[in-house]
Amino acid sequence: MYDIVSVKPLVAVLISLLAVPAIVASRSPNLREAWTFLAAALKFAVVASMLPAVWRGAEIGCTVARVLPGVEIAFRVDAFGLMFALVASFLWIVTSAYSIGYMRGLNEHGQTRYFSFFAVSLSATVGVAFSANLFTLYLFYEMLSLATYPLVTHHQDQEARSSGRKYLLYTVGSSIGLVLPAMLVIYLLTGTLDFASRGILAGTTGSRTLVGVLLFMFVFGFAKAAVMPLHSWLPAAMVAPTPVSALLHAVAVVKVGVFSIVRTITGIFGTDVLSSLSLGEPVLYTAAVTILAGSFVALSQDNLKRMLAFSTIAQLSYIILGAALLTPKGVTGGMAHIAMHAFGKITLFFCAGAIFVATGKKNISEMAGIGRRMPVTMTAFFLGALSIIGMPPCGGFLSKWYLVQGSLQAGQMPILVVLLFSSLLNAAYFMPIVYRAFFCPPEQAAFAERLGEAPLFCVAPLVITALISVGLLFYPQPFFRLAMMAAQKVIGM
């Protein structure tokens, strides 16, 4: 079943989970954070150690337990899963550093609880990335929902509790109500839930209607992907501390949602089946509506984190759209956008948090002239924005370029128009922020004095992620190579 049988995938999943007792038992903040960094570094090292074998075309895996005939708790590392795990495990290191500056800078309560559940969340994320079948993926998907609830409700006030309830209602309710029954039907049709490179539904007796219903049960059931109308939990969750927002938008939660949808499209249904039944188009246009609607709503937001939240809603559907194009370029672009968007968006959230730590400001209308006070932060914001828009010199240009080529391969001119128009909308809500930050008249500036940047632990991570966003245009490996390998396997090139 696996080219290489190894416990490395299991170890990668467990490292951060096993670090939780040490984090909880730490008697000082420095020791607690040392355990966090040690676990993060070890996790990334184990994940990266599997890169050479996967580049050679091998799959690494292990089986933990057999639950039913054809249903196991098992892990398998392939190109797509490894790409996602590399992004998540690397950004955990960066986000941990940022969390120190943010949480200490604001003297937040419950920091031990925060770092503990952060570690559990990364364990669940890598578990999803390395799942060998839909059953294992579902278990870790639900684990992530429960682990991130205490992070969303960190402030423990009425607004946080209300947002947390909405978060659980959408993410857990949809997965239990839609994904779980769809899994049962898939199992009855095929006798297995294992992911296969060309899907497992080929040759089954399922009609086009049944397959279409199952497909959309997964698209909407994995509500962490925030496909409209199951999206409102995402802006509501912005009550959480900014490092949690970064976790939600770049490192774990929403990426787990779109990863699960893409994995299901390619590994359960298969691009051949969806193409033969003409089921790619309904998903395409569902994603297109989400892209445009999310972008338009982002234009109207004054709260910076809410604006970024609606931007994320739109950007996630680029990934789903790429998979639904069912073309080599489209699938490659969609998969690669997981990495490109992650580095750009986490930069933007880091900047939003740094601004709040340094100035206490949350609203865009209050940030005129802030570029003179925080030039490093706002320059990084500019670079992150360019990556999200899809402009050089940032890596977001590459993934969107492949999505454009994929739409041309599929003959989907309306989708091409959506991609180009949505990039203009991205520019329309990002560029005025940058312009007013650096070029507003001095008499209109909200910050006449130049008091400096946020603490170093806030600023250094956002500089790192901004520079990586630029570097990914010129050196997009290993992410693009893994995306191309994954696309070649599921659809051919």
Image: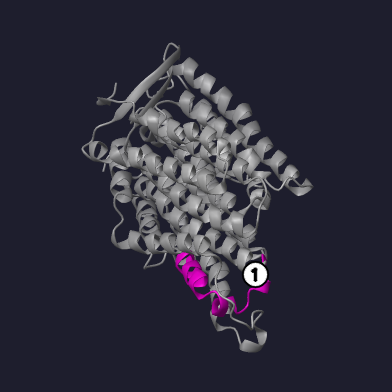
Question: Can residue 430 be seen from the camera position used here?
Answer: yes
- On the image, which quarter does residue 176 sit in? top right
Q: Quadrant of the N terminus?
A: top left
Q: Which residues are magenta?
A: 361-385
Q: Residue furthest top?
A: 69
Density class for disc 1 (Cα within 10 Å; few <14, some 14-19, many ≥20) is some
Q: Position of residue 145 (x, y in %)?
A: 59, 35
Q: Position of residue 213 (x, y in %)?
A: 55, 30
Disc 1: which residue: 359
Inspect the image, locate mark 1, and give the three-letter code of the amino acid beneath it: Thr
Magenta span has 493?
no
Residue at x 35% of width, y 29% of height? 76
The number of numbered discs placed on residues in the rendered structure image is 1
Magenta span has 369?
yes
- On the image, which quarter does residue 45 sit in? top left
Q: Residue furthest front?
A: 27
Residue at x 44% of width, y 39% of height? 262
